Structures are given as structure tokens and as C-alpha cells.
Image: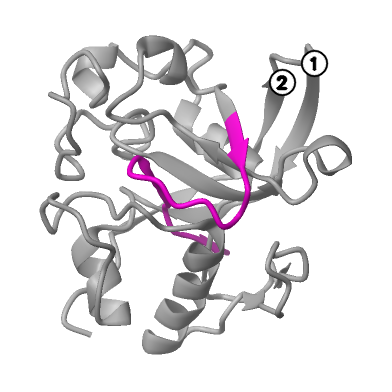
Amino acid sequence: MSREPAPERVIEAGEIVLRDEGTRTEWRIEVGAFRLARYPVTRELYRDVLGEAPASPAGPRTPVTEVSWLDAVRFCNLLSRATGLEPCYTIGDDPDGQDVVCDWAAGGHRLPSEAEWEYACRAGTPGVRYGELDEIAWYRGNSGGRLHDVGTRAPNAWGLHDMIGNVWEWCWDVYDPGVYGPYRVFRGGGAHDLPRGCRASCRRKSHPTLRIDDLGFRLARSL
């Protein structure tokens, strides 16, 4: 490979309280230590692994978008094999992705869990977001309606860029299978969003085949 994945940060173990604003419920989750990429997967890395990237006017160092949840887990396996790591995912034929199984003990690339994502995003901070919005994020108020190169806004205390803004990021989790079936979670807000969408606790969901121009993903690895 001519380009390597984004540098990773080791995120130490801890716990996080997740909240669902719609149902007004919250739940506490223990988070084990893991590795997380400093910024989302870029168009250049995606193209390097697959040979092509979804059509977009955005530059090579912007986050890849128009990538479904199923596309993202397949990419993780391909990148793992290309870099000599054990793939995490077993992927079947279900068009809804409900037969995808993650081996959390494998050493390869994967999507973060929702708990891992928010825990890493907050980086020990209790507020709505980990810094002043204009300093940490590309959002509707400063993005000019376009995506920007990764790593060009201030990182959080753990050295992670673009956790808020620029693009939403797919997570592993099913949102609420009893209500929404196979819908998966995505987090973080994007370049077109108002401040309300750019918060550490903001949760959204869609079908795992959704492809849209402000939704990408970030790589994690188990320790």
C-alpha cells in the first residue's frame, strides 16, 4: 500500500453514560482500552484500498462519503488483510447486514462501538462538546457548505480530530432493533449541520445501505 491508515491513539479503559433524547433514557457502559484513528478515513485511503472512491468534487484528504455501513465493514476487512492484520468481520449475504458478526478479539480494523465513539469524543470532558464549536469543527456556520481536509480543526484532549463536524461517522451498533430493525447508529455531526447536530451525545441512525454526502467512518482496533 502506498498510503497507511491514519495514525492511531490508544484510548485507555473507562466508562460512559449514553443518553437517548427521544426516549429520555440513559445507560452506563464500561469501555475497554482500544485504538482509534485520529481522523476519519480519507478519500485517498479508500481509493488506495479499493482502487476507486465514490464520485465527489471533494479533495483527496477529505473524509470519504457516500459509503454505506456495509461498505465500511467490507473496507475494514480489506484494509486488515492488506496490512497483515486479522479481519474482524464475518460478512454474509443479508442485504440488511444483520448477519455481520464482529470478532472483538481480532486485531484488525473495525468500526468503533457507539460507546467507544462517545467516550473517545468526550475525552474526559462533561460538556456538550469538547471545545468551542468554531475551533473544533466544520459545520454549517463555517464550512461554506463543503467538506474540508481532515485534521484541520483543533483536536480534543486525546489528540482526535473531526470527532465533531465535517462528516457523521458510522458506528457498529444497531440503533433500536425493536423499532427500527437493522438501522445502525452514526455520530458526530457534519459540515451541513447546525450546532444542535454537532454534539457529543447526538445520535442518528439509518439503514446500513444508506449512502449520503456527509456520512463517513473512522477506524478502530481492539487491544
Q: Amino acid at mark 2?
A: Asp
**Dot 2 surroundings within 10 Å: few (below 14), some, or many (20 or more)?**
few
Helix, strand or loop for disc 1: loop
Q: Is residue 22 above or below residue 64?
A: above
* Alpha carbons under labels 1 and 2: distance apart: 6 Å
Q: Position of residue 112 (x, y in %)?
A: 56, 52
* Residue ID for mark 2: 20
Q: Nearer the viewer, residue 29 or 203?
A: 203
Task: Say if the magenta span includes residue 213.
Answer: yes
Image-based side of 117 in relation to 218, left or right: right
Which quadrant holds the C terminus? bottom right
Helix, strand or loop for disc 2: strand
Task: Say if the magenta span includes residue 71.
Answer: no
Label ID, residue 23: 1
Which quadrant holds the N terminus? bottom left
Q: Residue at x 37, y 54 (%)?
A: 66
Q: Position of residue 85 (x, y in %)?
A: 48, 84
Q: Position of residue 118 (x, y in %)?
A: 55, 33
Q: Residue at x 28, y 11 (%)?
A: 132
Magenta part mainly helix, strand or loop?
Answer: loop
Q: Amino acid at mark 1?
A: Thr
Q: Position of residue 73 (x, y in %)?
A: 54, 67
Quadrant for residue 56, please give it.
Answer: bottom left
Q: Is residue 208 above or below residue 101?
A: above
Q: Which residue is situated farthest in the right direction here?
A: 178
The answer to whether marks 1 and 2 mark residues whose Cβ atoms lie closer than 8 Å is yes
Part of the protein shown in magenta: 204-223
